[in-house]
Image (tube, rainbow, N blue to C red):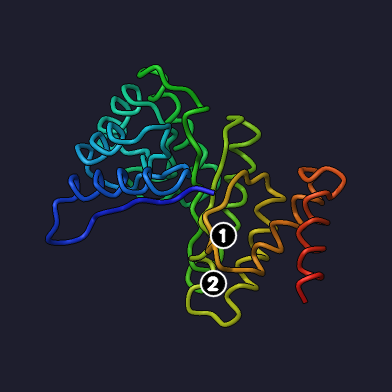
Amino acid sequence: DILNVSAGLDGIDEKSAIVESIDSIQRTVDIPLQIETKDPKVLEGALRAYNGKAVINSVDGTEKSMKEVFPIMKKYGGVAIALTVDEDGIGKTGEKRMEIAAKILDEAKKHGLDKKDFVFDCLSLPVITEQDSLLESLKAIRLIKENLKANTVLGIGNVSYKLPERSLLNRTYFSMALGAGLDSLIMDFYDEDMKDTLNAAKVLMNFDKSAEKYIEIYRKKDESN
């Protein structure tokens, strides 16, 4: 689990607010933090305040973004969510998104960074408006895993936007993404059906050895009913 920290609200000092939030969170709970900001000065202040290796949300394939974020990553450390977006927007095809990911890695190496410092977001859009794009996202995951040997992430919540039975669509697409090689997921923590899908997938993909965790979770559920 990772907690996302953002302070980008109108009318407040974002840098001061995010530093205060990080200090407060670190005194209260022991959980990895993800820093979300578009301002490099805010990012640097947040990473300086954080006693750990943060997830940086985010960098993308535009020259401006890479120029701003990479020196900060090199100085303070951290793992960045890298969006498969460039000056032309989201890559229209899986191949284009992989090309953007490769471009990010090539530029990162010039700053002494490596693929282990990134998790690539192949981006999922609402199926009601971007049906073809979702298949390209899955293709991008496969291509990045096969050709770049890099880690991937998806935010699933957008998939079902404006459609009924949202959880059904989200968890079905999640299963498809796992089959394509997805490493990590941004999800609604309170979606119990999605948690069930994740627990089952860990067994079927041989991550949960002998289904030990699965048995433990659902035995406790049975006992509480």
Q: Decide: is 110 above or below 158.
A: above
Q: Decide: is 38 above or below 222.
A: above
Q: CA distance from mark 1 to mark 2?
A: 11 Å
Front residue of this view, candidates 95 and 199: 199
Q: Position of residue 174 (x, y in %)?
A: 64, 59
SS category of the residue bearing label 1: helix
Residue identified by numbered label 2: 160
What numbered label is drawn on residue 134?
Answer: 1
In the rendered image, the residue lying farthest to the right is 210
Lateral position of residue 213 relative to residue 8, left or right: right
Q: Residues within 10 Å of mark 1 (few under 14, many from 20)?
A: many
Do callouts 1 and 2 mark residues in contact (Cβ within 8 Å)? no
Q: Decide: is 213 above or below 60.
A: below
Q: Residue at x 23, y 38 (%)?
A: 40
Q: Residue at x 36, y 40 (%)?
A: 59
Q: Position of residue 137 (x, y in %)?
A: 56, 52
Front position among marks 1 and 2: 2
Q: Quadrant of residue 70?
A: top left
Q: Residues within 10 Å of mark 2 (few under 14, many from 20)?
A: many
SS category of the residue bearing label 2: helix
Q: Quadrant of residue 58?
A: top left
Q: Position of residue 93 (x, y in %)?
A: 52, 49
What is the three-letter code of the residue carrying label 1? Leu
What is the three-letter code of the residue carrying label 2? Ser
Front residue of this view, candidates 6 and 98: 6
Q: Residue at x 54, y 59 (%)?
A: 187
Quarter of the figure with the C terminus: bottom right
In the rendered image, the residue lying farthest to the bottom is 164
Front residue of this view, candidates 166 and 76: 76
Q: Quadrant of residue 83?
A: top left
Of mark 1 and mark 2, the one earlier in the sequence is 1
